[in-house]
Amino acid sequence: MRCSPDVAVFGDLGMSTNTIQTQSGAVKPEWIRFPKAGHLCPFTGLTRSFLYALATEGKIKTLSLRERGKARGVRLISYDSLMTFISQAGAAA
């Protein structure tokens, strides 16, 4: 199944993500995927392991999408919580 870049439907879950148009015209996602191993987050440049550490410490919000009975799923990061964390870390420095 192919999805347009602004809406993704997750299997039979009936869930979708919508992107939000900002005043500057840039598209801001609600949720982003963790980067693949060995790659950096395209929005922040942070590593996968650092993002998982932030999630484990409760510093950013995440969501796990997994079908019942399946061993694997997809973990998503709240874009707003990630940007809030970065802003607060920058203000504290």
Image (cartoon, rainbow, N blue to C red):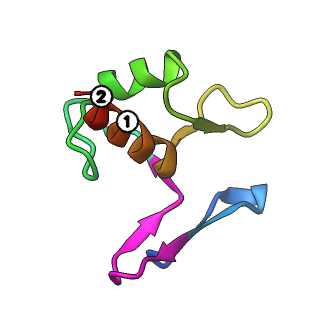
Percent x, y for residue 56?
51, 17
Percent x, y for residue 39?
20, 38
Residue at 25% from the left image edge and 51% from the top image edge: 42
Residue at 72% from the left image edge and 60% from the top image edge: 15
- Magenta-drawn stretch contains 84: no
The foreground one among 68 and 92 is 92
Left or right, 11 with respect to 83, comes to right
What amino acid type should be assigned to the residue bearing mark 2?
Answer: Ala
As drawn, 34 above or below 19: above
The foreground one among 73 and 44 is 44
User: CB atoms at circles 2 and 1 under 8 Å apart?
Assistant: yes
Left or right, 31 with respect to 12, comes to left
- Magenta-drawn stretch contains 31: yes
Residue at 53% from the left image edge and 42% from the top image edge: 76
**Does residue 34 show up?**
yes
Chain part drawn in magenta: 19-32
Q: Which residue is mark 2?
A: 92
- The C terminus sits in image quarter: top left
- The N terminus sits in image quarter: bottom right
Q: Which residue is mark 1?
A: 88
Q: Which mark is residue 32?
A: none
**Does residue 1 show up?**
no
Percent x, y for residue 68?
80, 35
What amino acid type should be assigned to the residue bearing mark 1?
Answer: Gln
